[in-house]
Amino acid sequence: MIKLLKMTGILILAIVVLITISLVLFFNFAPQIGASPEGKRLERMESAKNYKLGKFHNTISTKMDMKPGKMFGVMLEFFKNNDNREPEGIIRTHKFSPAAFDDLNSENLSFTWFGHSSILIKIDGKKILIDPVFSERASMFSFMGPKRFPYSNYMNVDRLPEVDAVLISHDHYDHLDYETMLKLKDNVNRFYVPLSLGAHLEKWGIASENIVELNWWDSIELDSISFVLTPSRHFSGRGLNNRFSTLWGAWVILGKKHRVFFGGDSGYFPGFEKIGEKYGPFNLAFLECGAYNENWSEIHMMPEETVQASLDLNSKLLMPIHWGKFNLALHPWKEPIQRAIAKGEELNVNIITPEIGELVTVSEQVMSAQWWANYQ
């Protein structure tokens, strides 16, 4: 009996060691994890005012870590069967037509939302793709992790029109997708990203001359358009120990007639008001309103804060994003947009809610069809 217990203990230990070694090897060599900044890129990081003690910092104090007991409770909640966190049935989405998108009047501001935070914008005739995630999962693994909701039509790189530039807000898997980048690398020659994030793109085969890295408040021009990277209240990291190793941010897009704000991921903070004062008023603000929880409220806004942020930014229209595609939190999948609309009505904020894949030309007329009401 003692011999059997010893053998069982040795077997369990061997399994634990094997799993540990496999994880270490994966996080060190799997290409989707990306790369660590080095050389001149690292020198530039270290000279940045928002980089101290080996990591980037938010503009204000931001708490992220939960106590072990609370973290364990949250993990248990994730494993509970809760049908409300994902839709029942297939969400009807529009089949994207690149020709129709090309035909949209270049004098107007137009866009298509592909679910979550992936957006294609047309401004001053230029087509700008932001945070494209077209893979099945928002995960480092192809076989596990948050899986996209069932859509009648999924977007992919092959159906895109010619894209003039790609903007990335930060390096989390639901905003920076390895497989999508591999397919874009030979079709786009301008990638604008936060400081040091270019290390990931170079590892994936994107030419260094096609990558422009910006720190907060830096700007770059593309013909008549200016792109400005502004602060957001969030964090970064794709591996086990590289949190805060690349910068995160939001994008201001300034055209001849239109101004757009893309918030990426962010907790609510005074920076929205500062950005609004400096670059507003905006014609349209894309702001996250999903994947929130009281336990991480300083890095993801509650929907009511999303609406207040659009007021701070002085935006004429609010387009809530970061919902409708992945189950990343504990709330029902429709709750983000329901809460945002309720708060928008209270504060008299115009909210635009197009269907996924729909071609939208921005105007003063608010598109408020509540398409999600057709699903459980």
Image: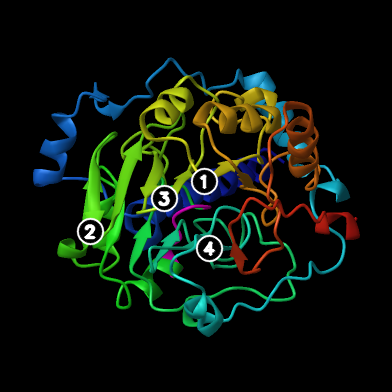
| Frontmost residue, 84 versus 356 | 356
Quadrant housing the N terminus: top right
Q: CA distance from mark 1 to mark 4?
A: 11 Å
Looking at the rendered structure, which numbered label has been put on residue 283?
Answer: 1
Tell me the residue at 89%/60% (across/down): 374
Magenta-colored stretch includes residue 178: yes
Magenta-colored stretch includes residue 99: no
10 Å crowding of disc 4: few (<14), some (14-19), many (20+): many
Tell me the residue at 51%/84% (across/down): 99
User: Are discs 3 and 4 less than 8 Å apart at CB?
Assistant: no
Residue 193 as seen in the image, left or right of residue 70? left
User: Are discs 2 and 4 less than 8 Å apart at CB?
Assistant: no
Q: Position of residue 332 (x, y in %)?
A: 81, 43
For discs 1 and 2, the disc positioned in front in the rendered view: 1
Q: Please tell me which of labels 2 and 3 falls first in the chain.
A: 3
The amino acid pointed to by label 1 is: Asn
For discs 3 and 4, the disc positioned in front in the rendered view: 4
